[in-house]
Amino acid sequence: MSDEYVWFEGIPFPFVNFPPEHLRNVKENFVLKDEDVLILTFPKSGTNWLIEILCLIYSKGDTKWIQSVPIWERSPWLETSNGYKLLKDKEGLRLMTSHLPIHLFPKSIFKSNAKVIYLFRNPRDVLVSGYFFWTISNLVKRPESLEQYFEWFIQGNVAFGSWFDHVRGWLSMREKKNFLMLSYEELKWDTRNAVQKLCQFLGQKLEPDELNSLLKHSSFQVMKENKMSNYTLLPSNLLDHERGSFLRKGIPGDWKTYLTVAQAEVFDKVFEEKMADLPQELFPWK
Ligand code: PPS
């Protein structure tokens, strides 16, 4: 499998758009500004949903921006060459997204007051979502079966490495006042409340009608129809739109449909081993 990734400091990356010299440059030289807002996630944790929500917060619920600019230009991915170009000389508010693990993130983060939002999701759902996504994309080696992908995921041999290391790494920043951790589950179970929490963290205020517009336009159904957000603008040599959608189901707990009882038991054991020393109340799906 190793030849199907670009490897950088022990982490596998998709082979399109992530040259190692670029990843090194980002880590060593990218300078964060205090006004920056960062969305950090392990892939398939609801990144694009959060981007849509943040865009609507900063547009006060107005849909012009989300309906006219592709989502990857509104909050570019720092670690991609294209995203970096959009971000590096941008003035004013910079929304940016990253899947980088903490040890590969620009070092300037440790001195910056940029606002950091770490969104995480039940790893069982991340696994299932990732399996379906990588099966329709041409960015990494396609898994042949869920059983195979299950093994890769547990071992951390998937794009951006181990979910466990990613979450452990970023949650080490959870006591900082410029850091907000949010779970996909809490976002889904009470979106209104989670958005209010985000607004408070970002120092933004929405009127009730602005908040209602945000909730409507960032909903799964509406995002799925928005071609600026649903990834149908990606060429089909990268994402095979005939075989599935980027916005697949958008629910917590879908793993129960796909993992066997035996796999679920193995997963529980691995989770316990790797995450035992973290307060378990951080993980609301338990
Ligand atoms: S990526 O490729 O890492 O950027 O993917 P990411 O955006 O992190 O995660 C994709 C999953 O998020 C779901 N999604 C949503 N869920 C609920 N509401 C909204 N609005 C929404 N938008 C995206 C998307 O459907 C993927 O999850 P699954 O479980 O595969 O459906």
Image (cartoon, helix red, strand yellow):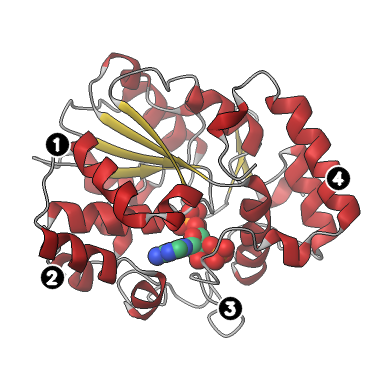
- Residue that label 1 marks: 203
Circle 4 sits on which residue? 265
Spatial separation of the CA atoms under disc 4 and disc 3: 29 Å
Residue at the image point whose x is 61% and y is 22% from the top? 278
**Residue at the disc numbered 3:** 244
Q: CA distance from mark 3 to mark 1?
A: 38 Å
Asked if residue 96 lies left or right of residue 103, the reply is: left
Lower sequence index among marks 2 and 3: 2
Q: Quadrant of residue 36?
A: top left
For marks 4 and 2, the one nearer the N-term is 2
Q: Earlier in the sequence, mark 3 or mark 1?
A: 1
Q: Answer whether labels 1 and 4 touch (C-beta < 8 Å).
A: no
Q: Residues within 10 Å of mark 1 (few under 14, many from 20)?
A: few
Label 2: how many residues lie within 10 Å, few (<14), some (14-19) or many (20+)?
few
Residue at 19% from the left image edge and 68% from the top image edge: 213
Q: Position of residue 145 (x, y in %)?
A: 81, 65
> Is residue 11 at least partly visible in the picture?
no
Mark 3 element type: loop
Give the mark, 1 or 4, whose residue is nearer the N terminus. 1
Query: In this rendering, does residue 251 appear at all?
Result: yes
Q: For numbered disc 2, what is the local secondary structure?
A: helix
Secondary element under disc 4, as helix, strand or loop, is helix
Residue 248 found in image quarter: bottom right
Q: Residue at x 60, y 45 (%)?
A: 285
Query: Of the residues shown, which amino acid type is indicated by label 2?
Result: Lys
Residue to which mark 2 is pinned: 64
Viewer-side label of 1, 2: 1
Could you tell me the amino acid type at mark 1? Answer: Gly
CB contact under 8 Å: marks 4 and 2: no
Vertical side of 235 occupied by 201: above or below: above
